[in-house]
Image (cartoon, rainbow, N blue to C red):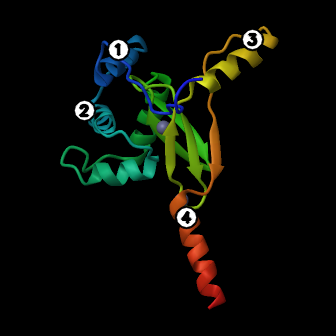
Amino acid sequence: MASAADFSLGKVDVALTPRERFAEFLQARGKRITRQRQVIVDHVSGHHEHFDAEQLLADLRRTPGGANASRPTIYRTLTEMVDAGLLRKMVLGGRAVYEHDYGYPQHDHLHCTSCQKLIEFSSDELGRICEAVAGQHQFRVRGHRLIISGLCVDCRTNRSKSRHQDRV
Ligand SMILES: [Zn+2]
Ligand SMILES: [Zn+2]
């Protein structure tokens, strides 16, 4: 029996920087990495967070290079970055959330439906279950995505506190 399960994320080494990889992807489609796209890619690559397009827009507008970033450019660039394999998109409660994919290890999420917090974890055991199920259907696994929804510890404590106050 192995010791306590390790749900931490490992590391992935990549040959190209996200900007290089993006430039390559665009080039193959006859597009150029414009200044605006560059600012967006660099900003996104520099912060590992789960974010949505509106948050990115607000963050960018506070930076000198992104002060006049436009909403359509941001949405278009995010879609291109997903297609280029740089970002992963998840839809949580109707909200599109993006996170790094390129150079970032495969992982799954606990999603708090109250404060929208995402907690990342990785489990080899889950990978084995996917392989076993796929095997029964002669299916080849390319990836999986598991989102466990519920309430995080902060929201649970706040909730029981307010419930307590209601009674007082
Ligand atoms: Zn929460
Ligand atoms: Zn994540």
Circle 4: residue type:
Cys
Q: Quadrant of the C terminus?
A: bottom right
Residue tagged by mark 2?
A: 35
Circle 3: residue type:
Phe
Circles 2 and 3: CB atoms closer than 8 Å: no
Q: Nearer the viewer, residue 69 or 95?
A: 95
Closer mark to the observer between disc 2 and disc 3: 3
Closer mark to the observer between disc 2 and disc 1: 1
Residue tagged by mark 1?
A: 24
Q: Residue furthest front?
A: 1
Closer mark to the observer between disc 4 and disc 3: 4
The answer, for residue 93, to whether it is visible in the render is: no
Circles 4 and 3: CB atoms closer than 8 Å: no
Dot 4: element: helix
Q: Nearer the viewer, residue 125 or 108?
A: 125
Label 4 beta carbon within 8 A of ligand 1:
yes
**What's the CA distance linking mark 2 and mark 1?**
15 Å
Circle 1: residue type:
Glu
Q: Earlier in the sequence, mark 4 or mark 3?
A: 3
**What's the CA distance linking mark 4 and mark 3?**
39 Å
Closer mark to the observer between disc 4 and disc 2: 4
Residue tagged by mark 3?
A: 139
